[in-house]
Image (spheres, rainbow, N blue to C red):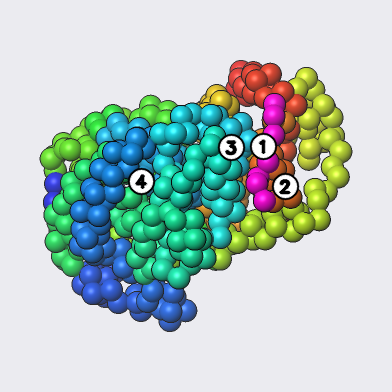
Amino acid sequence: MIRMDTAGGLAVTTTVDASAALQTLTSAEVPAKLAAADAGLWGPDAAEEAAIRLGWIDTFTRSRSLVSTLDELRTRLRGEGLTRVVLAGMGGSSLAPEVICRTLDVPLTVLDTTDPGQVSAALAEDLAATVVVVSSKSGGTVETESIRRAYAQAFTDAGIKDVGKHFVVVTDPGSPLEQLGKAMNATVILADPNVGGRYSALTAFGLVPAALAGVNITDLLDEAAAFAASIPAEQPDNPALLLGAVLASRDTIAIADDGSGIVGLGDWAEQLIAESTGKDGKGVLPVVVESPVAPGLHGPGVLSSLVGGSKSSASGGSQLNAPDVAVNGPLGAQFLCWELATAYAGRLIGIDPFNQPNVTESKNNTKAILESGLDTETPDFTEGAIAVYGTNASTVVDALIELTGQVRSDGYLAIMAYLDREADSATAETRALLAELLQTPVTFGWGPRFLHSTGQFHKGGRPTGVFLQITGDSAADLEVPGRDYTFGGLQAAQAAGDRRALRDRQRPLLHLHLSDRDAGVAQLLAAAKELGES
């Protein structure tokens, strides 16, 4: 049986029988209550948090006030020669604008990293034409603040007199970053404080960088508004309700772009789903796969999903390779649909979809390690350019065999690379290689970016993960101005803090450190391929 629900130019098509879950939601009048921003939908323990986190339901209406402001700001910046937009942000502050600009083919440099090579490469590009959007709800995100400091120093060193005009700050009212932005003489834009970061795609966090880069954000808001009429609807023709019911039916969702327009939505949805549902030992694990034919899209317990159709009609988009669910429609509607679906799934799973109780743990570990110094660790062995920690094996191939052998049939492997996602991008090929071998879910995340998404699931979600961490020496380090650590030191501390959090939970963990990144990545890929051929 195939069911399709459509609204506002977006269609959710599925072969999954979600009738029981739909009945559970509609009999409790959940769609109407969510439309009314009822904070009690997720139980009394979640009500206080939900009461200040439901602004995303109609934020597309309030965000229209940003349109003229951002048009004027973009015109002024372009008139001053500031044509290159760099975004310094993490998690919800960076993922939505990245997918918006990738989908609409608008250039935007996203820095959600502490890798010294990646930061240095961005700093080397046309400073005179650069405006840096510094995005952080709290204003205390260490990655974002470090990049802000690096750019402020770089502008000063380049002889730029009015450094403040090269910055646009996006933050919540009353945050330390608001005061800092004003003190810098930067342009400060205040976001909606009643929207959590991962639900903020259609707030200032998603729209400011995209608009300054050249996106017509009115289209996104119109697309969301057209879809929003379906929010209180009883089934059928409530695509988000159908998607939420289907999402809660499986332990894992694999997401791929179907080639019909959307680019990179899986990375944004990964953060939304993992951080919202991965807690209390529960949750739906999101796995971003490279294409509709990539290993890992299908499998036992896996909900295969394809997304596409940035400008498609309700019936548009591809449904290659028989997915369990396809979500096709314009990007503004996609954002709202997945946010709603995640909230519905949270109700069915029985968790608070707005908190993130384990995200701060690795942050606190990082802070402690920066203050006390890295623990001394001796590798179990070194082979070529790879030092190996946490194994009884004596070769890289055997270490991978030992690790992957611990992945249960109901478990997953998480690959976590604290490297340069531009220069070391080939590292991501390990995901498909090991997914083909294991036939179980394999995720891939760039550190520290993933700490703000699947990092929550790793610690708080289903305790079935097995972990492969990859770190590497940098060819050259970079100071964090005004701090007693470097970007390389911060990156190493973040990786060590994450290892500590996983080891405290006795999660299986293999750590590979690359003394030479190019040689080490090549060696790792060769080992993964050998593993698959053995």
- At a point 42% along the width and 65% down the height, the residue shown is 172
Residue 304 as seen in the image, left or right of residue 420: left
- For label 3, the SS is helix
- Label annotation for residue 157: 3
Amino acid type of the residue tagged 2 in the rendering: Tyr
The image position of residue 149, as x and y in percent, is 58, 48
In reply to whether residue 477 is colored magenta, the answer given is yes
C-alpha gap between disc 2 and disc 1:
9 Å
The quarter of the displayed image where residue 32 is located:
bottom left
Amino acid type of the residue tagged 4 in the rendering: Pro
> Mainly helix, strand or loop, the magenta region?
loop
- Pick the front one: 457 or 516: 516
Position above or below: 311 against 48: above
Report if residue 367 is visible in the image.
yes
Q: Residues within 10 Å of mark 3 (few under 14, many from 20)?
A: few
C-alpha gap between disc 4 and disc 2:
29 Å
Residue at the spot of label 2: 485
Amino acid type of the residue tagged 1 in the rendering: Leu
Residue 21 as seen in the image, left or right of residue 390: left
In reply to whether residue 531 is colored magenta, the answer given is no
What is the span of residues highlighted in magenta in the rendered image?
475-482
Amino acid type of the residue tagged 3 in the rendering: Asp
